[in-house]
Amino acid sequence: MTLIKQDFSKEEILQSGIYYAIGGVLASCIALVSSLYVVHSLSLYEYGVFRLILSLTGLFDVLQFSGLNDVARNDVAIALKSQDEKSAAKIFFEFVWLKFVLMLFAWGAFFAFVSFFLGNFYDKNLAEILQLASLFILFQALNDVLVMFLGAVGALKTISKTTPFFEAINLFFTVGVFMIFLPSVHSIVLASVLMQTVTLSIYCMLVQKDVRRLWSFYRFERPTTIIYIIKTYGKWSVFSNLLGDFLSNARNYIIKFLLSTEAVAVYSIAASFYLYLSLLFPVQKVLANFLPYKITDHDIKKDYFTLGVRYSTFIYICLMLVGVVGVTGLIWFVIPKYAASLPIFYAMLFSLPMLGIQYFSQIYLYTLRQQRIIFMRMLLKNISAVVLLFTLVPLFGQIALGIENVLTNILLTTLVYVMLVRMHPELKLELSSFVVRKSDVIFLKILIFKAFKFHSPKSTPS
């Protein structure tokens, strides 16, 4: 059965979104168990070192131009919507060849850095761990290609079914390796390598039929399409992701410089719980995959924006309350040595209600190919984060890491919303836009009934 489609109904989008959310909740629960097992088994210092290793490989991953992933996914989806599989194949396979070249360059640079620079200044054991971790760069390239393809064809149901299974594999390898080799930084890196090898192999089997189908439309030639995309709107996405990836991975080294390696571990726990909460309502992922099939500059779908912001804001506020109760209990009773993460996490929670406006505005801009504005957003995020970290941490200590998150999100939400409304004034939100009405509940019930083919109420919302 093929994964490729030309369009999706509201019911299909909602059904995929619900499946994706359920899969995300299951995956997050399993990932949470795995994370708690790791942080309980490792010391604060060891976990901090592990996070720094991930950040180091991430800094070299910047060379793989992850900003092209979403641009290529968006354009492949638009081509498939137009039933132009030849163009979709050309974009996809030119993206694959480019990723392969960039992967070799990034991996070679990292391996040389570890072998010839760090190997002369640090102990041999650390160099060996980093050489093993270099495989993360190869895995990241393959993961980018596979996830981009699944996103382009809107296969969120497939992702939702496999993600919990993959997290279970991760837990299995983590427990198994820790039992055989004892908990250590080397053990967790080895477990991650084994897990990614298995999960990426499964992904390859899932998409191979549809990739072969696109291959039948492809003719090897000069990569004019991907070059055109990069030269026009794609370059802004590349630049913005270069900045974003660099900051997200450099942040841990800034924290180490300003505070300590242990502070990296404390911050990582707070950030991880914040991420788990936001993933319980994966509106950004659902929008990014389906919006290219639904809107254009001339058909902006105001109801998608208004209703989406309203529902997501309400849900994120509910998740704040869940986070206060649930995460507090988990940390105090399971990993009390990370109690210092709680003030940072509580501060971060104030960012959640903004995510509805920010995500919807950002994905609308992305779908409308306003990558220059997305670049401005990322530039602002980098400047804001660096300035606030170096300003607030000396004044307030560790809690400043959470305060920075909130202030930066306020700036980002304001920027993307104002820029979107400037382009499309009809999307302007009023205070009444955030009020959940009885008609909204009826509307959602109808969609859910239709999405899962139950008997639908005959009434329609006013």
Image (spheres, rainbow, N blue to C red):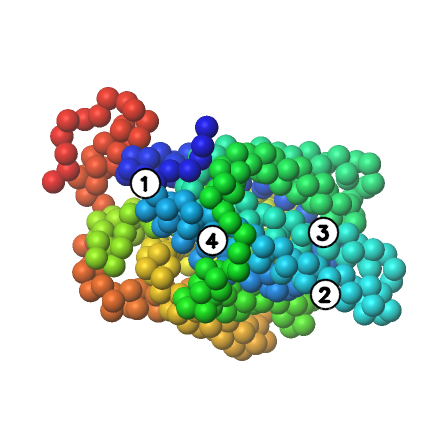
Query: Which element carries disc 3, helix, strand or loop?
Result: helix
Residue 429 lies left or right of residue 40; in this view the side is left
Q: Are marks 3 and 4 in contact (CB under 8 Å)?
A: no
Q: Position of residue 358 (x, y in %)?
A: 36, 59
Image point 62% across, 41% down: which residue? 200
- At 27% from the left and 55% from the top, the residue drawn is 296
Quote the CA–CA distance across marks 3 and 2: 13 Å
Nearest to the observer: residue 220 or residue 392: 220
Circles 2 and 4: CB atoms closer than 8 Å: no
Q: Which mark is residue 109?
A: 2
Q: Earlier in the sequence, mark 2 or mark 4?
A: 4
Instruction: Report the amino acid beneath label 2.
Output: Ala
| Whole-percent x, y for residue 391 in the image | 54, 77
Residue 357, placed above or below residue 323: below
Looking at the rendered structure, which numbered label has been put on residue 135?
3
Q: Position of residue 179 (x, y in %)?
A: 79, 36
Residue named by callout 4:
91
- Label 3 to label 4: alpha-carbon separation: 26 Å
